[in-house]
Image (tube, rainbow, N blue to C red):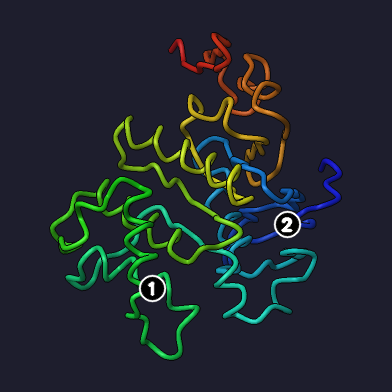
Amino acid sequence: MANVPDALVEAREVRFGYTGGAAVVAGVSLALGRGMLGALIGPNGSGKSTLIRLLAGILTPTRGSVLFDGAPLPALRRRELARRVAYVPQAAPIAFPFTALEVVLTGRSPYSSGFHFEGERDCAKALRALEAVGALRLRDRRMTELSGGERQLVTVARALATEPVCLLMDEPSAGLDLKHRAALIRLLGRLRDRDGLTALVVTHDLQLLDPEFDRLFALRSGALVAEGKPQELLRDAELQSIFDDTHVRATRVGGRTFVWSES
């Protein structure tokens, strides 16, 4: 693990396994500094989603510790953590026919007492979040009527409405078309540059990581096998090692890195 003196999110020898199974996350240590965009990359089943849930406090490590702003997660009050860290799952379950605006408003719940969060200020922030992700047109549509990609945009807007200092996102671009995938990455870059947002994203969209992202963390079989800048990891030899695939290729053109498989 690289030395990060001003780490906002940190894992120290984190280990996790489901009952009766092998370790899904096997002694991972990583640190992400304030105002940095990081990405978790690696093959399917490498432990990326489990690790991001551990960092968000949704799962508890069986060994090791997760720190936020220097404090162990269990030492933080849940409301304070909910205000500062927002988690975006791969696909949020939609059990009730809420409108998109109603769902985004739930992102304001850490600032409310009880279940009341319908003030003008909260509504304004929710609408701005929908606008930021290009989904303002969906405000009055019911979630049960939306496509998977549209629901994902609303889920991201819900996280933004919380106004967190840190976003932890599990494949947030899943289900999005190419236009919205690229727009989401650009949005994260703007929020980092303007507000100092810190974000860690699980992604398979390697094409979109360079140049916006500051650091990549590569997992394989539950272990951290590499970390570095996009220009350092998005190269033939490194990618072939990470994905155990000799067909992976990368080339840098015009300040961007393009990744493909020859198979």
Report which quarter residue 214 is drawn in: top right
Quick check: 99 left or right of 123? left
Circle 2: residue type = Leu
Question: Which label number is shown at residue 254?
Answer: none
- Of 25 and 180, the residue lying toward us: 180
Where is residue 33? Give x, y as percent: 74, 48
10 Å crowding of disc 1: few (<14), some (14-19), many (20+): many
Where is residue 52? Give x, y as percent: 58, 55
Quick check: 119 left or right of 211? left
Mark before the other along the chain sequence, 2 or 1: 2
Report which quarter residue 263 is drawn in: top left
Question: Which label number is shown at residue 122?
Answer: 1
Residue underneath mark 2: 8
Circle 1: residue type = Asp
For the point 37% across and 87% down, the residue is: 115
For the point 59% across and 40% down, the residue is: 39
For the point 32% across and 61% down, the residue is: 127
Where is residue 62? Give x, y as percent: 70, 68
- Of 33 and 93, the residue lying toward us: 33
10 Å crowding of disc 2: few (<14), some (14-19), many (20+): many
Q: In which quarter of the image is the N terminus?
A: top right
- Of 192 and 232, the residue lying toward us: 192
Where is residue 202? Give x, y as percent: 52, 44
Q: Is mark 1 on a helix, strand or loop?
A: helix
Separation (CA) of disc 2 from disc 1: 27 Å
